[in-house]
Image (spheres, grey):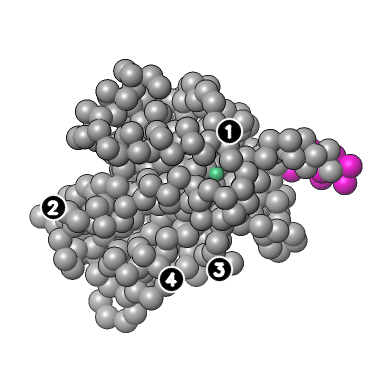
Amino acid sequence: MNETVLRKLEQRLGGRLYARQRLGIESDHEAQIFGQGLTFFHIENWYSIHSVIRALLKLTGLYWRGRANAARVQVRDNNLHCKRLPPEFDGFTLLHMSDFHADMNDGAMRRLEEILPGLSYDLCVLTGDYRGATFGQYDSALASLRQVISLIKQPIFGVLGNHDTIRMVPDLEVMGIRMLLNEAEAITRADARIYLAGIDDAHYFRVDNIEKAASEIPHQAFSMLLSHTPEIYRQAAHAGFDLLLSGHTHGGQICLPGSVPITLGSILPRKFGAGAWTYHEMAGYTSVGVGSSIVTVRINCLPEITLHHLWCVKGGPPFSFSKDGGPR
Ligand SMILES: [Fe+2]
């Protein structure tokens, strides 16, 4: 264990326990195929199958089209009309990016460098999976990500995914990303406040703590939660969050015609696998992600970044989505 990184993490997290717990789980279960986390089987950790999938795609003639698709990052708009949003935040826009897997998605990263300077937003959120693999070195992922982050306006908030080690946190924060490790921050506009919380990975490492993240948020305040995986939608809704932003599923990444996923790699109803959805009084959005993992291909599921436009409405249901949402 790198003592310098551990000391930095302990300082950042205000104690020894959480950093040691996360690092311990990482070293015990790193790249385990069966048994750890919410799902029993983890294809992302079965590295010998990756070349088999690649060969199968080449045989079926889908590989090169899928590879080109992996760089075709789209901008999607999600217009969300919220009854509880303070009027001062009417028109507030969040740029949401997820699942970079930056070291294995050069094409998508170059595409981001083209798109990002032309976008207008108030705040940026990143919902995890910065690294390609689930173990080993992370320097090349951080180097590739650094170029993209330099093009994003502050403030930037992020959470870790199941491909990320907590060792990356000090470097991510030096880049200017405020990592939310079961923590929350207030966002202020005029005299009004809304809250943004973020939890650590709930899918594989299971080090999420919604109670801790929500503990500083005043009752009845408008609040948003960042989680790499949407699998915690029930806990988030019953904790009183208004909006859950997540990624992880890649929308299936390799899909049948009509964007029907073969697998979402999650324990999740299909309707929560991609795009906008609601659960009880909470709205949610699952980004299909910027990058691709396992094999750098996308079939019937193009990568995306998302602009969530929040609008204040009086009366009606807690949330509604505009029908004009979709790729630009
Ligand atoms: Fe991912």
Amino acid on which the number 4 mark rests in the picture:
Thr
Note whether residue 88 is visible. Answer: yes
Residue 133 - label? 1
- Provide the secondary structure element on which disc 1 rests: loop
Circle 1 Cα neighbour tier, 10 Å, few/some/many (<14 / 14–19 / ≥20): many
Give the x, y percent position of residue 7.
27, 23
Disc nearer the start of the sequence (2/1): 1
Asked if residue 309 is positioned above or below residue 278 in the image, the reply reads above
Q: Mark 3 packing: few (<14 Cα in 10 Å), some, or many (20+)?
A: few
Residue 159 quadrant: top left
- Residues packed near mark 2 inside 10 Å, few (<14), some (14 to 19) or many (20 plus): few
For marks 1 and 4, the one nearer the N-term is 1
Above/below status of 6 relative to 28: above
- Mark 2 or mark 1: which is in front? 1
Report x, y in % for residue 103. Answer: 57, 28
Which residue is drawn at the image coordinates 36% and 25% (left, top)? Answer: 171
Question: Which residue is at 14% across, 57% downward?
Answer: 192
The amino acid marked with disc number 1 is Ala
Quarter of the view holding residue 242: bottom left
Kindly identify which numbered label has been placed on residue 190: 2
Whether residue 242 is in magenta: the answer is no
Residue 181 vs 220, above or below: the answer is above
Instruction: Point out the tag, 4 or 2, that comes first from the N-terminus.
Output: 2
Callout 2 amino acid: Ala
What separation in Å lies between label 3 and label 4 (alpha carbons)?
A: 12 Å
